[in-house]
Amino acid sequence: MDPFSRSVTIALADIQLQTALDRGTTRGVNARIGAMAETTDAAALRHQARLARERALNRLPDLLEQLERNVVANGGHVLWARDAAELNRVILELCQKHSVRRVTKGKSMVTEESELNHALEARGIEVTESDLGEYIIQLAGETPSHIVFPMLHKTKEATARLLHEKLGMPLTDRPEEMTRFVRNVMRRKYLEADMGISGVNFAIAETGTIATVENEGNNRLSTSTPPIHVAVMGVEKVIATWEDYAVLVQLLARSATGQRLSVYNNLMSGPRRPDEPDGPEVFYLVILDNGRSRILATEYAESLACIRCGACLNACPVYQNIGGHAYGWVYPGPIGSIVSPLLLGPTRAPKLPYASSLCGACQAACPVEIAIPDMLLKLRRDLVQAGDPTPGWRIGMKLWAIAFKSPTLYRLGGRLVGWLTRLLAGRKGYLRRLPPPFDGWTTSRDFPAFGAPSFRERYARRVHKT
Amino acid sequence: MSARNDILNALRAALAKGEPFPKADSPSILPVTRLDPNEDLTARFVAEVERVKGIVHRATGDDDARRIIRDLLTDRCVRRVTMWDEAHLPLNGIEALLGELGIERVQGSNEAVATAEAGITSADWALASTGTLVLSSGPGRPRMASLLPPVHIAVLTEDRIVPRLEDYIAAQRAQRLGVFRGSSNVTLITGSSRTSDIEMHPVFGVHGPLELHIVLIENLG
Ligand code: SF4
């Protein structure tokens, strides 16, 4: 079995995971639907948000230069990294330069791409994830399974056991008590940290401002308390104007958690000014490419419009069943099935474009109207053209195409297959096992014999009658 | 070649064939939240703050506001407060009040501020349709006062309430976006610190303040 199919099989049999996914994704979907329905005009707003992202992608290099100029004018520094390894190197150099020993981190998916935590820890630097979910994942030695709710795969019972075993928390099944416990643990970490590292949700070019979105306050603490703040962003995060920020940040909150605005929208323009009483003394912005410029040149450019709200994950019937880890890399769910093969190269994630029923729930949920099913289909085409299928598969598909194009052949073929399945199924009405190459279908379910008369026959009769 | 030039060149090369999205010029103009033009902004603001687990205390004037703050502090047995300078609050006499109550004002290092049990600030603006406070950092306006203490008390007058985020941005645009250049940190605060990380079940009071109190002073006349 290939790695993807193996992790899916394990995920489907994991009762705890299934419970957690059920509870989590249902809440997420309902929250989003409610919050989008009470806007001025959900369809028009999604389109407006989409255009804001398109405008930014159209002018990406110019906007990045404008952003850089303004960050510098605000007293900050801008550094660039071509790939994940360079990103880690740049941040390690900063740590060395400033003799950093302790780091607190606000949520950042980009640093998951480069596995920055491992790189820092390998140099003896203590890294503490400060988002509640990220912290618990870090304690467990796991990776996030959702881009907004990193510990969606964990039940509250499993969380309580973990906190009990690792940190001696008295056992409880109340999320309130677990949260309070972690708050107290984290307080010291913020005050002792030499550097805070955060992600970036939006970078507003016209004033050189970095916007983060959060609910807990950990991001504000990580970016305000330590003397150095390092913000890390992918090149695609830059946007042109504050008006664009207003629509995007509100649709992000509504789509991600069903809130009108997230609790803390933190807007940071450089380090503290000389006369300000607090805030970081030094501010660095690190801009990462890591394959994004390559994507911009392709027909998959619109995947860069994603604002990482996670709505498509919650809405996806495949994600709802297999969870985030089965996807095998940082970005799970429908958008992950596009971004992972594009960023890693198609051979590293060959099954992901197929991990979709193409039902379209993702696209319907997406606040920036990304045509996810279309792109999944195109990625499948690319895989076929790159020589993925076996000769048998190729010939089978050719025959299939010929039969589908001719009504007569289709009718005859349909009759033949219907008759065959009924013959083989006998009295039971279903087949335990299909012959190869169709036996994949029956590894986990039975195949019902085709009904008689067929739909086409019944339809023809009805049309004649009326 | 430097990483910077490599990346910018790669992006320029990707766009060399022309813009990937040719029809993207119409600007963002439609506001997001619904708001009836005749709606009472104060009432809407109060309702929205309550939805997100903040508490609004309406004060009829400065004396009333000082009484509310006094009660908030004494009810919680607060011994130490960190605050914005009085010049940045919409009412005076807070320092005198602290002295009278024997409460110490702490400021300076994060370690010192972390011992405060309450933080007192004002807000630049309030957004009615989302129940949001806008705070900008600056001289005499520490960020920590709204962040480190377990109780955050924000004092503002009713005339600071504008309808929506979009109106706030438009007002900053009219001022040539000066606040985003001059202040290292502008924070939009909508309710109490919360998380939904454990099974998407909402819990209030995570890393930020556990309680958010807004003292809203009625406009004169
Ligand atoms: S693709 Fe759309 S729905 Fe999915 S995370 Fe990105 S913005 Fe959200």
Image (spheres, helix red, strand yellow):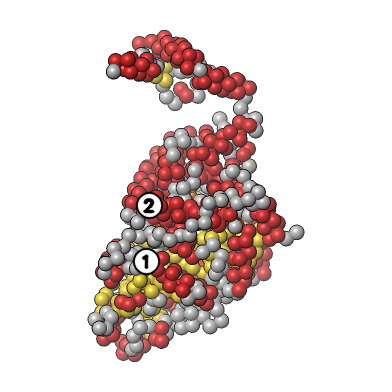
Residue A328: x, y in percent?
54, 42
Q: Residue at x 52, y 77 (%)?
A: B182
Label 1: element kind:
loop
| A249, A432: nearer the viewer | A249
Residue to which mark 1 is pinned: B164
Ligand 1 within 8 A of label 2's CB? Answer: no
Label 2: element kind:
helix
Q: Residue at x 49, y 65 (%)?
A: A242
Look at the image and tell me in which quarter the C terminus of chain B lies. bottom left
Mark 1 packing: few (<14 Cα in 10 Å), some, or many (20+)? many
Residue to which mark 2 is pinned: A42
Is A156 placed above or below A440 here?
below
Look at the image and tell me in which quarter the N terminus of chain B lies. bottom right
Q: Disc 2 is attached to a residue of which chain?
A: A
| A148, A444: nearer the viewer | A148
Q: Residue furthest right?
A: B1
| A97, A199: nearer the viewer | A199
Mark 2 packing: few (<14 Cα in 10 Å), some, or many (20+)? some
Residue B55: x, y in percent?
29, 70
Residue B210: x, y in percent?
35, 68
